[in-house]
Structures are given as structure tokens and as C-alpha cells.
Amino acid sequence: MPAAPAQKEANLRRYVLKRLFQAIFVLLAVLSLVFIIGRQIGDPARLILGLEAPEADVVALREEMGLNDPIFVQYGRFLVRAVQGDFGTSYWQGVPTIELVLERIPATLFLSALAFGSAVPLAILIGVLAAVRPGSFMDRLTTVLSLAGVCIVDFWLALMLIIFVSVRLGWLPTSGFVGVGLAGLPFAILPVATLILGPVGRVAQLTRIAMIEEINQAYVKTARAKGLSEYLVLGKHALKNALIPTITLSGDVLISLMNGVIIVEFIFAWPGVGQLLMQAIQRRDLPTIETLVFTTTVMVVCVNLVVDMTYAYINPRIRYDSA
Amino acid sequence: MTAPNGESLHGKQNPDPAAPNDELLPQPVGGTAAPLAKVTLGRIMRGFRRDNITLLALIFLFLVVMSALFAEFLAPYSPTQQNLRLRLMPPFTPAVEGGFPHLLGTDALGRDIFSRLIHGARISISLGVASVLLSGTLGVTLGLLGGYYRGRLDDFLSRVVDVQIGFPVLLFALFLLFVTGPGYWNVVVVLALARWPVYARVVRSLTLSYRETPFVEGARAIGCDDRRIILKHLLPNMLSPILVLATLEVSGTILGESGLSFLGLGVTADTPTWGKDVANGREYLRIGWWVIAFPGLTIFLTALSINLAAMWGRTITDPLGRWQWLGVSPVLAKAPPAIAAPSRENVATLTAAPADASTQPRAGNPPVLEVKDLRVEFDTPAGVLYAVNGISYTVEAGQRLVILGESGSGKTVNVETIMGVVPSPPARLSGAIYYRGDNLLTYSPGQRRPLLGSKIAMIFQDPLTALNPAFTVGEQIAEMFRVHQGLSHGQAKKQAIEMMDRMRIPSAARRANDYPHQFSGGMRQRVMIAMALALGPEVLIADEPTTALDVTIQAQIMKLLREVQTETGMALILITHDFGVAVEMADQVLLMYAGKIVERGSIQDIFRQTAHPYTKALLTSIPRADHKGGRLTAIAGAPPRLTHIPFGCPFHPRCPYAIPRCESEVPPLRPVSANHSSACHLFEEVLLDR
């Protein structure tokens, strides 16, 4: 039976609330994990002051940092501060870690947005063309790309691109960053190319499979019988349905980009959060690492929320079934 | 680190319970048991010769594993032996003391790259296998427990799996390794902790699907305890998907390890690893590309080989796939002689059959639709499928033609050919379909398109699948006006609502914004009819429009169709297997059997002067209120497979009247009376026999 509009709204709202609740659960779980692991690694006071510092100073700092309080008090304080975005001071830079991280986010966002924005449309295009013409060049390209995407390691691909495109041919800068925007584009080309190989392969392959499945559906026959052009039959009727699994996967793509930026920023000297993570690891800067883990989790959770909402929007059936 | 082939989409299928595999082989059809093919060495060799990429992958993997095991004996140099005179030497540099040449060159300390790669295999392979064993054991166990016992444990595990799969692996691994410090076993454990959810998810969904299957319920019924069911019944059936997954994971783990090594958080000691070697070459990328290129290439080739091997593993663990790979056709059916496929000569006889008077081209005003000697064939793995075998009929304006037949009689293919929705190729079409005198089969798709939907429209059997789930019904109707008449969005929508209103869909204006799944079956079919009638077609084809609907709704839809037909004066071609519908709707009736017309006439003629044994059999199989207590008769035998249509009259194997002539000679469609014809050698006898 048809659901009344009010009912529709209520279902949608319940769906959104459920998702939000799950997101909060995830954040809390990650925070607790970070807290527990962070306390296992050694005496933070000692880490800050260094090995040569006199014992008396360390004891004083422990008292000052509240490290002698009961563990629950420390945990509560940690949570309250975390919610306020306060993860302490970087051992390495001596500034609040959240500032360090926020300062690096634009560079990473620029890179990820370029990668995501080019990978997904490109992959969908390749996948659709492969599905429409089996055995064609695009079809073979899809298979090759998806295999290459899971077999080529990104750090090697990045270095090979630098060797051949930048060093040998001299077409693009080897590494560096001049800022977000048009001027920064030449510097972003190789990092983006490295980042998208895997995602393009996976999304193209999935789109191809989904599209082939949709082309065999009865409604495609109806669309042809309606006298629609093949462009409308495939590009509108079949594609909108085939995009449903692709959208779910694009959440995965964003997650794997978060993996990729760590390596790519490290290699291309790109001053984003990935590079910050490697620097923090080399300098054993625990608060910065904790902040990065937490902000990444927030991003992952947001990505999943957005994907779920888009999914609900594009797939009308889910608005009812899954509420 | 996932399989390249849309696993996420198809990973949850139910594979067949993998009892002893050979039992799953499709048994030869047709009774003539063929000897089961054996897996012989020769077949395997030939299989590999056809599939030489897999062979290369397996050979490469073998070499890598050998290197890992016997690196000390295979490597020409010690991996740590420095030679400062031969620093950064390119590939194929001869050795100084006349030793083995440096095949792949040397690195910045003059160490032999080839030897380092051979030694590096040890870390990669052993770490990959160890980590996969650990993550596999953990994931499979938790997946089995969660899927089998359900409840809280399952909810909790599923949540953890979802969260972890959605978290960047590298960040997770780096964080843990930062805490634990680098080291061989730390890397093994960290990678295992990062990847176990992959197995848990797959195994859980497999367990869920097997839980309810008869073989598990049977085991429970005969008193097997849970442990035994899980270990003896569930696990063995999942083994091949788990093994394929684990193989892929070895590749993923090797890549993961190399990444960690590259970042300096992998294995510590000065054992060479592929990832570390790439990192070593970073500073020299301007002068020594080979230092970076070869370790990375080795990682790539190893991962590629593992992936190809896993794909091969997937093929050969599937019984059908295995036989195909071995080049043995699993279907060894030999058709019994009685139902051999029509030979070319036989088809020639079919063609030679004298055409019925009514199919002669007529002068003057051509009919709306005229089908002449239409044939449709498909190539299938089981042979040529003869779907439509030379049928001819005409449809006049305002006429209601009912095509009656069982499923597989070719009635749907026939009308889908008119609509041009039977893809050709693969289908082979011959004959002609005239719309107002023009042969549609000579039109290009682009020429035909303006007619489709606007002059000739079609309603499909199941409105749920025939409507696009992703668009509102209003949009799907409005599209007709936009594409064919170029109306604007607003105008088209208004017209669409008006059409829905005419088809008596309540509160059409509001419901136009709903999606197909929000409608009941009957309302959905009304939407379909609204769409088909939107542009006032001259011919409406309705393919079993009520089969998918409730009985009470069926009558309403038929009534609606009748009303709009009378109202608009269009021609209606209605396909059905239901005599009752024919009686209610038809001026003219065509009976189809095995892709041919067996009887044609007005509904009265068909009923009162049945002139074909098949029609007669159909009529006596209808339950009738005035024959209370009488036996319900069904037609003996089954309709022929369209790949194996009997010689002569296709109905003869089931026909009580059959004489030897019926087995050899195709009966032509002969006139019984003015507007009534039958394709039976003995229709006179059938007519008299009441």
C-alpha cells in the first residue's frame, strides 16, 4: 500500500537517526581504543621530557598532567577534551595537535577531491562502455585495470611515474606543493594518477557487472519498446539502476583514498595529513597520531553517512524497506 | 586488496552444497548415458595449453616459492655482500672477478639486486602465508560462530566487522605498529588483525545461507551436535570459496607488508625485503631506475600470479567450470531420433507449404499489420532454437486478435519481433512484418523507433519488472510525450497524469510521483497500459497482461483493455494461454504450437468446429462447470523443446489421431471454412469426432 507523505518523512527520519546513532557508537569505540592503546605505550611524561630528564621533573609533570588520577577520571577527562577537539599538545611541535591537523587538511582534501572527482566518473564511463560492447577495447581495459589496481603497489607506481614522467621526460614536477588551486594542479597530476589506479579498476569492474545485469532486466525491453534511443535506454534507464551498487562502492573508494594519501603524500612531499602522520610516527609524537586517528574516523563516519544518504536518495526502495 | 571481480556484488550467492563434486555434474539428458569423462594428465596439459596465462602465473609462483625456500642455494651472491667498486651498476653488468653477471644491476652499496630479490621472497611469502593463516583462522571461526548461533554475538561481530572493513587498513596497521614497534611477528599479527573481518563477513553469510538447507537441517534432525554440524557439514562446503579468498588475501598481505616495509615499519633486521629495496632506491631515482623498478616489478608479478591462480582456483573448484576448463563438454546429450532437430530439408518443406489465402499481399488499403512467413532462430549451447517457424497473419484496424498457446510455443518471441526488442543478432530473423505496407524488418533501429510506442505499443507480462524501479511512474509515462512529441517536462507530466486518470488510477496527480514498488499489481498494470496508450497507438500488443496478477484483478484489467479498445478503435493483439480470456476478448484466434500456427479462425469456429487435435485437447483440459464430476484431462506428454522439434507435424508425438504420415510430412495450414483453417492432415476426421 502506498505510504502517506507524512509516513515517508517519518521513515526517512528514523533511518537517518539510526545511522547517526551508529556513527556515534563508532566514534566512541575508536576513542576508547585510542585511549587504551595510548596508555600502553609508556609514560607520556617521560616521552615529553625525553630520556635524560631528571626523575623529579617527570614526577612533577605526571602530577600536572593528571596521570596519577584513577583511570576512569582520566578516561572521562580524555573524552570531554576529545569532544572539544583537544587532544593535547604535540610533543614535536609544542602546539595543540588539532591545530597541526587542521592546518594540513586543505592540502589532503584538494588531493582527495581531485582523485575522487576524476576516478569515479572515469570508472563509470569505462565500465558502462565495457558493458555495452562486450569484447571491445574498453571491456579488455576494464579487466586489465582491475587486475593492475589490485596488483601494483602504489609507492612503486608513484616512483616509476616520477622516474619516467618527471625525470626522463621532464613533463611534470617530481614532487612538492605550491598551494590549493589551479597553480597547484601540475603538482597534483602524478599523485592523483597514483591514487586512482586501484579505485578506477574496482569501480569500472563493478559498474560493468552491474550494468550487464541491468541490461538484461525486463524494464530495458520496455524502454526499447517505448521507442527510446539506445542512449536513453542505457544511459538513463539502465544506468540509474546500475549506479546503486557503484555508489555503495564509492564509499570504499574514499576510504582507500585515505590509505593512499598516506603513501602518496609521503612520496610526493605533499604537506597533508598523510605526511603529518609519517612525520609524527618518525618523531614518536603520540598526541598527533591520536588526533589523526580520531579525525580520520570522523571523516570515515561522515563519508559513510553521506554514502548512505545518497543511496537512500537514488534507490527509492530503501527508504521504506530498511527504515 | 579485494578481488578484482565484483565480489562485493556477487560474493553472497549460494553456491551449491559441494557434496562429492562429481554428483553435481549435469547428467546427460535424453536417457542415453554417456561415459563420464575422466580427469587425465593429457586433458590437464591441453587445458594449460589453451590457458597459458594461468600456466605462466603458476610457473612464476613456483619459482618465487622455490626462491623463498632455497634462497641461499639459488642466489648467485649474498644479499648483503657489498661491492663498492660496482655501485649502482645497470642491469647485465659483468661481475669483476668473472663471476655471475649482475643480471638486474646493483644498488647504491654495490649489492646484487637479483640476489636480494630472491632472498626477499622469503619474507614476503612466509609473512603472507603466516598472516593469512592467522587472519583466516580467526575470521572463519568468528564467522561460523556468528552465523550459526546468531543472537547478540552475531550482532556484535557484524558491527565490529562493518566498522573495521570501513576503516583505512594502512592507518590501522601504522597505528598498531607504532605502538608495538616493527618486527616480523608484529607485522604478521597486525596484518591479520586488519584483515580477519573479510573472512568473517564471507563465512557468516555462507553459514546463514547453509543453516536452513535440507542437508544441515537433516543433520540436526538425526541428532548431530552443533560441533559436528559446524565441522563436518558446514565447513567442508565452504572450503573452496574460503581457499580462493585466502589466496587473494596472500596477495593483499604481500602488498601490505611491502608498503609497511617501504615506510620503514616492517621487518627490522637487515634481511632484504622487496618493499625495503624500493625504499632504498628512492634517493637514487635520478641515476638508478633499476634499483626501484625490479623490486616493484617482482611485487607486481607475484601479486598478479596469485590473483590469476585464485581465478583459476575459482574455475576448477566449480564442477561445471572444471569440465569446461578441461575442454570436456558436460552436456553429452544425444537426442532420441523421434525428436531430432529439423534439418535444412525439413525447413525447406516448411517453406514450401502453400501459403494461406489470407496472407497473400492485397491490393489497395494494406492492413495495419501483416506478418508474413516470420521465422526467428537463436543459437544456444544446446543447438539452434527454432522459436518461430514461418507464421503469417494479418491484423486489421479495430480487430481483436488473440494468440493462444502454451509457454514455449513462440507466441511471445513472435510479438517481441514486431516490437524489435528481440536482439538480432544473436537472433536470426527472416520473413516480413509489414506495418501499413512497409516491411519493418528492413528498417534500421533508428527508422523503426518513431513507430515504437507511438504507433505500435506493447504491454508486458509482469508490470513489476517491466517498469523501471528507479523512476517515478509519472516520469515513465511522461517520457513518451517528451521523446515522441517533444513536449516540455511540465506539459508531459500533465498529459501523463491525465492518462493515469483515464486508466482509473485513483488520485493520479499525487500518485504520479510514486515509484512502481509503491503500487499494487493491478495498479501497476494500469500504469503500464497508460504508458502504452499514451500516444494513441494503432496496434496494442498485450503479452499475457494478467498472468502475474490476482484473479480478481485480472477481470478488471481485461475489462479496461476491452473498453479502451472499443473507445479508441485500435487493433489489439492479446497473447494468452487462457481459453477463457480468448472467449471474452477475441474476434480472431490464432493457436500456436512449437512456433507454428496450428489453427486459426473466429472464436465461434474454434469452439464449435474445432479442427485441430491440439485445440481439442486444450478445450477438454478446461475445467467446466457443466461437466461436474467428470475427469479433468491433461494433454499427454510435454510440449517439445524448441531445439528438438519433431519431424512432420510437431504435435504428432502427443496426438491421439496421429498416423504415419504425420511423422514425415508437415501439415500445411488448409482452409476448413471461409475464415477458418487448420494445420492437420486429418482435420476432417477431427471435425466429425465430437
Image (tube, coloured by chain):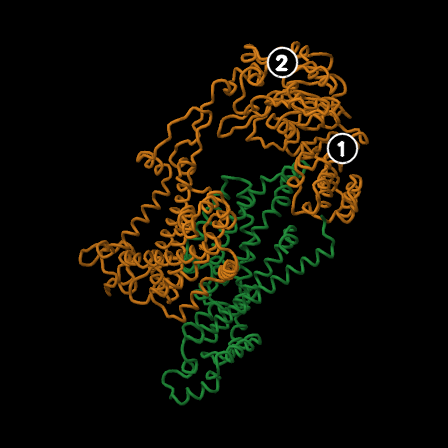
Chain colours: A green, B orange
* The furthest residue to the bottom: A56
Closest to the observer: A177 or B394?
B394
Q: Which mark is residue B561?
A: 1
Residue A291 sits above or below residue B43 on the image: below
Asked whether the viewer can see residue A102, the reply is yes
Q: CA distance from mark 2 to mark 1?
A: 33 Å
Viewer-proximal residue among B67 and B111: B67
Above-or-below relation of B16 to A277: above
Residue shown at the point (52%, 63%) measured from the top left: A111
Crowdedness near tag 2: few (<14), some (14–19) or many (≥20) residues, C-alpha within 10 Å:
many
**The image quarter in which residue B661 lies:** top right
Number of numbered callouts drawn: 2
Q: Quadrant of the C terminus of chain A?
A: bottom right
Q: Amino acid at mark 2?
A: Cys
Tell me where residue B665 appears, x and y as whole percent: 56, 12
Comparing B99 with B428, the one in front is B428
x%, y% of residue B314? 42, 44
Furthest residue in direction right, as rendered: B567
What residue is shown with label 2? Answer: B680
Residue B608, compared with residue B538, is above or below; it is: above
Residue A202 appears at what percent x and percent y?
49, 51
Residue contact between numbered discs 2 and 1, judged by CB atoms under 8 Å: no
* Residue A257 seen in the current view: no
Query: Disc 1: which chain?
Result: B
